[in-house]
Amino acid sequence: LRTLSSLTDKEKLSGALTAFAEKLRQTLGFYSGVNTQDTAVKRMSRKLDRTRVIALVGITNEAVRKLKTNVNLQLLTTWLSSQYRRITWQK
């Protein structure tokens, strides 16, 4: 969330979100038995279940699609932060 607030350039934000989505996809692969040495992937797999990871991938991809339109970056990052929080904190 801190990283999102510091990104004020559409291309940088798009790159960061794309990289995050890739880590999430790697986490899904790890759940399926794909071996990895990536500590971020292992940490996410311990903290999040598959359903949440899939939801995070969907929201992240939606944000990347919205970046291709004339969207206000502050509003997008605020929306995205709230969606991440909702997904990761829901019971």
Image (cartoon, helix red, strand yellow):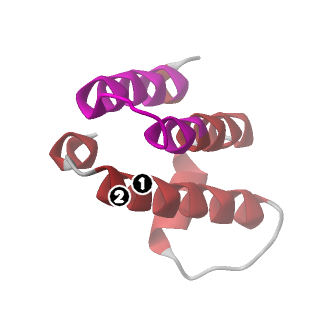
Percent of width and height locating residue 62: 58, 36
Q: Which of 2 and 18 is in front in this view?
A: 18
Percent of width and height locating residue 20: 48, 57
Quadrant containing the N terminus in the rendered view: top left
Q: What residue type is labelled 2?
A: Glu
Rounded to the nearest angstrom, the CA distance separating label 2 from label 1 is 5 Å
| Residue 11, numbered circle | 2
Q: Quick one: which residue is furthest to the front in this view? A: 70
Q: Does the magenta stretch include residue 88?
A: no
Q: In this view, does 79 lie above or below 84?
A: above
Q: In this view, does 9 lie to the left or right of 42?
A: left
**Label 2 element class:** helix
* Residue at (31% x, 59% y) in the render: 12
Q: Is residue 74 above or below residue 64?
A: above
Q: In this view, does 64 lie above or below 32?
A: above
The quadrant holding residue 51 is top right
* Residue at (47% x, 72% y) in the render: 39
> What secondary structure prevails in the magenta region?
helix
Mark 2 residue crowding within 10 angstroms, few (<14) / some (14–19) / many (20+): few
Q: What residue type is labelled 1?
A: Ser
Q: What stretch is highlighted in magenta?
A: 62-87
Q: Name the residue under label 1.
A: 14
Q: Are marks 2 and 1 in contact (CB under 8 Å)?
A: yes
